[in-house]
Amino acid sequence: MQTGGLARDIGLADEARFIIELKRRRDLVYEYLDSWPGAVDFKPADIHDALFSYVRNRGKGLRPALLMLCAGAVGGDEVQALPAAAAVEIFQIWTLVHDDIIDRDLLRRGSPTVHSSYAQQGLERYSLTKTEADHYGLSVAILAGDLQQSWGYALLCDLANRGVAAELVLKLINRMSSSLTPRLLEGEMLDVQFSLSPVESLTEDDILRMLSGKTAALLEYAAWAGAMIGLGDREDRNGYAERLGRFAALCGTAFQLQDDLLGLTAHEATLGKPVGSDIREGKRTLLVYYALASLDEAKRTKLLSVLGAQKASSAEIGAAVDIILESGAREHVETLANSYISQALKILEEIPDSESKGLLRQWASFLLARRH
């Protein structure tokens, strides 16, 4: 799906070049993770393999690339920031492992989620009952996610081996543990609670606050951390680290809005999970919020009857998707996502020109141009 406006600012040739740059940084991060010596202590085998399953099934690398580009945008060394970029990717991965449990998703990037994969192993290897096998899968996924979170902190400590001052390393760890993690988990908890709440009890601001914690917080941290590492012992007199953090936070909200759109409009093979799964889970997205605000009583009742219905048929989910898309909610969300990117790019203008800044602009536009 192609959204309008700013999403078209990145042309096909520029997008192709950007994807090459994105992939180069992503590959650096994953090569670093694959060769990390401390991984020998990730035991037993089920924990080790579960921990690496999403690492091997590589994502796009948008978050670590953001961190590295922000280091470069303030005149720093991207390679020096590599351990932090890896830490951000691992932080994202542990949240996905746990989020898949919460959302009861069976697929991630087109492959079985950790808990569903190990539930199957429980059936095949240990001859467990379905209930016990499901519990085994959940246990492995929870423990793997816990260990991934610990790994993220260890990766940040690796920065000291690349010349980053110990004081800054501690600052990065402290912000990840005392600010980022509570904000992200608040967003996740609100997402769960909102799905159990009457739609009419929520406001647009409620949903945006949830998105800010669930998605924008990690991108804000990545940008800020990259800039702080790039600045090194130089004083940040112009507040570039906080500005880049704000840039990334705005992009993060747009990113989640685009994710919600793709969850209804992308092809399942491209998306890597069932289309319409947010409807089955009863997610209170802005798409649902805007649709319900504009529908007549008959269509509103039909949509509400499917929203959060775990046993809804594929046909019922498809009908609910059609109702949302025909309501005009899609255009409303596209406009809002573009407005966030526009605000973010205005902040980016305050950063000195450089190749890294140009790539950050393309990074922002790519968030809305992507297909999955």
Image (spheres, helix red, strand yellow):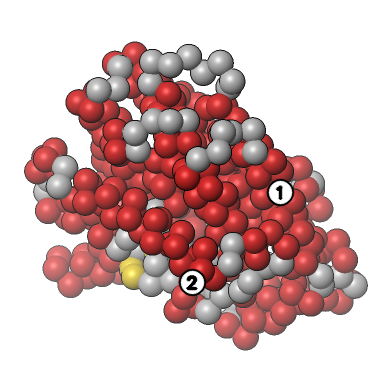
Residue 140 visible: no
Mark 2, secondary structure of its residue = helix
Label 1, residues with CA under 10 Å away: few <14, some 14-19, many ≥20: many
- Type of residue at label 1? Ser
Residue 173 percent location from the top left of the image: 37, 25
* Vertical position of residue 224 compared to residue 147: above or below: above
Residue 168 visible: yes
Nearer to us in this view, 115 or 176: 176
Residue at image point 50% right, 50% down: 359
Of labels 1 and 2, the one closer to you: 1
C-alpha span from label 1 to label 2 = 26 Å
Residue at image point 44% right, 62% down: 17
Label 2, residues with CA under 10 Å away: few <14, some 14-19, many ≥20: many
Nearer to us in this view, 194 or 21: 21
Residue at image point 30% right, 63% down: 57
Residue that numbered label 1 is attached to: 342
Q: Quadrant of residue 91?
A: top left
- Type of residue at label 2? Leu
* Vertical position of residue 78 compared to residue 130: above or below: above
Residue 145 percent location from the top left of the image: 32, 45
> The N terminus lies in which quarter of the figure?
bottom right
Q: In screen coordinates, is 184 left or right of 200?
A: left
In the image, which disc is placed on residue 271?
A: 2
